[in-house]
Image (cartoon, rainbow, N blue to C red):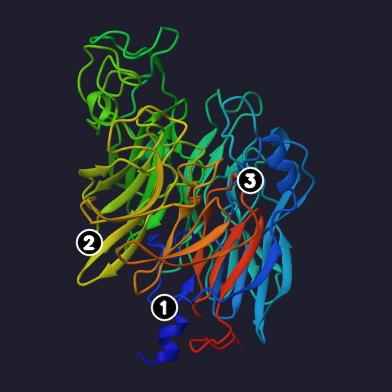
Amino acid sequence: MDILSFLLLITWSQWGGGPRHTGSLPIRGDRFSLKLHESIVDPHVDIKRGEAGGSLLVHYQTPLSDGNEVFMEAIGGAYTTFQTWSTQTWGIRKFVWNEGQLQQQWTTVSDWTPPPFAAGAPRFEPVFHAALNEDFVYMPARGGTVQEVDRTTGAIMRRLGQFGTLDGNTYVVSPITIDDAGNIYYNTLGLQTEDPWRTAPTGAHLVKITPAGVASRVSYSTLVTDLPQTCASQFSGTPQPYPPSPDAVAPLVVCGVPRPGINVTPAVGPDGTVYTVSRAHFNSRWANLIAVNPDLTVKWSTSLRNRFNDGCNVLLPPNGTPGGCRAGATTGVDPTDNQPGSGAVNDNSTSSPVVAPDGTIYYGSFTGYNYSQGHMMRFSAAGAFLSSYWFGWDVTPAIWEHDGTFSLVTKENRYEFNQPRIPGLEAGYFITQLTPELTVEWRFQSTNFTEERPVGYEWCVNAPAVDRLGVVYVNSEDGHLYAINQGGTLRERIFLKQVLGAAYTPLSIGADGRIYTQNAGVLFAVGDTIKPRRRPARQ
């Protein structure tokens, strides 16, 4: 393959870079010489932060890039409160590099809205997330559909994925994935008008659209058939610490039907197998990782339930001591339900499956008992649960391939507001690299200590990026973009805009090595002024 043909394949076209969500490109990332561009993505940031006590409870799109072209979410409309967040508008803005300047070319607005805010809804504003192919941008749209946008002009060409009458109560609830063959995949959720999150959904589907525009779908109730009518919930209304007694049984609640987690992006393996994640509508602790054949028949479905034995007396202080479980509790159980820990699918997360080079699948689940840090879960290509690591909250890990193997790059936020902790697991904020089996290779700790942040600033990245040398690119709440070398040493950092309780933010690497990221609702491009790997503009 010649150099030009190779460069033509290097795009960051969707969540996690490509259909396997590995968050990597086989090129070298730029040095942080300059902030080359900044432009507003979300004009409502100040209002959103004000009503959330300074935090920015929003999920934003990954900046998408292909050669000299960059595509980013553009938010508009009006905003008054998160309770009416659908008064905003969402769309795609195209930029083109021209003589060192990233110039806006067009903006196209979608008719998409997020699911409504109501009792039981996620508090983080859901993500609007498009994907690219050679000729078009595909963006979420109204009624569970996708709008096909011409990359050159910004014109909306077609509405795809419509089944019958357009239903305003059906929502695209995931970023869009495009596989190697050009097929489009995404998740939809139909909700009732009254009390939508506490009544049964009207539908929950994985949708496929072929390159010819033919749409098909499968219900999550077809993909997951082992969900019981009633599910173990968690203890409440009794004095803590939990469990209330060594043999206490958690109360049962109605599970609800299986549906996709909000913001879960389907991943697609090299053989066309689609991987997605479900949860019970009324109980996030009853969840499954699902493998789906290209014809939308189920390949396998594996429960995330009762997979961990690291609760009482393990990740928590000794039973009967401050912060520990009740005296006499069984070692290893989750004290909130007195069972082995379960991977939950939390609708405030963007965690999505990652398909590794050896066919294993990784998913970052939520668990509350270990200080709300979650667990990274590893499964075989046949759906067997293999191992876990004790952080997984709201992160899609990146994969660095090297020396005939690979490493997993993730964050590890040991939140300081959860105390006390056992020795060795004190509060702190780390970027962590793991082996395929999920053992630690190295950690890089946030050491930007201040009086307000005595243990450092949180890593606000939810999908890291890694280049061919293994340099890791991540965002921090201290306002900086970081580049971390292999071995866990700092290469460099650059201040973007401001320190804030930042939105968990994905970032990407362009084909020319520039780094694209977001801070406080502003898109940034960072890199060198000299571009030896520049890809020619599209004709």
Can you see residue 356? Answer: no
What is the quadrant of the C terminus in the image? bottom right
User: What amino acid is found at the position of numbered circle 1 in the picture?
Assistant: Arg
Q: Position of residue 248 (x, y in %)?
A: 28, 9
Instruction: Name the residue located 64 percent from the left edge and 28 percent from the top edge.
Output: 118
Left or right for 504, reference 305: right
Rounded to the nearest angstrom, the CA distance separating label 3 from label 2 is: 37 Å
Find residue 130 and report its image quarter: bottom right
Q: Which residue is under mark 2?
A: 358
Instruction: Name the residue located 34 percent from the left edge and 74 percent from the top edge.
Output: 469
Q: Is residue 197 above or below residue 534?
A: above
Instruction: Name the residue located 20 percent from the left edge and 52 percent from the top edge.
Output: 437
Characterize the local packing of mark 3: few (<14), some (14-19) or many (20 or more) Cα atoms within 10 angstroms.
many
* Labels 1 and 3: the sequence-earlier one: 1
SS label for mark 2: loop
Q: Nearer the viewer, residue 367 or 143?
A: 367
Q: Which residue is under mark 1?
A: 28
Q: Is residue 400 above or below residue 514?
A: above
Rounded to the nearest angstrom, the CA distance separating label 1 from label 3 is: 41 Å
Q: Which residue is under mark 3?
A: 143
Instruction: Name the residue located 61 percent from the left edge and 51 percent from the top edge.
Output: 499
User: What amino acid is found at the position of numbered circle 2 in the picture?
Assistant: Asp
SS label for mark 3: helix
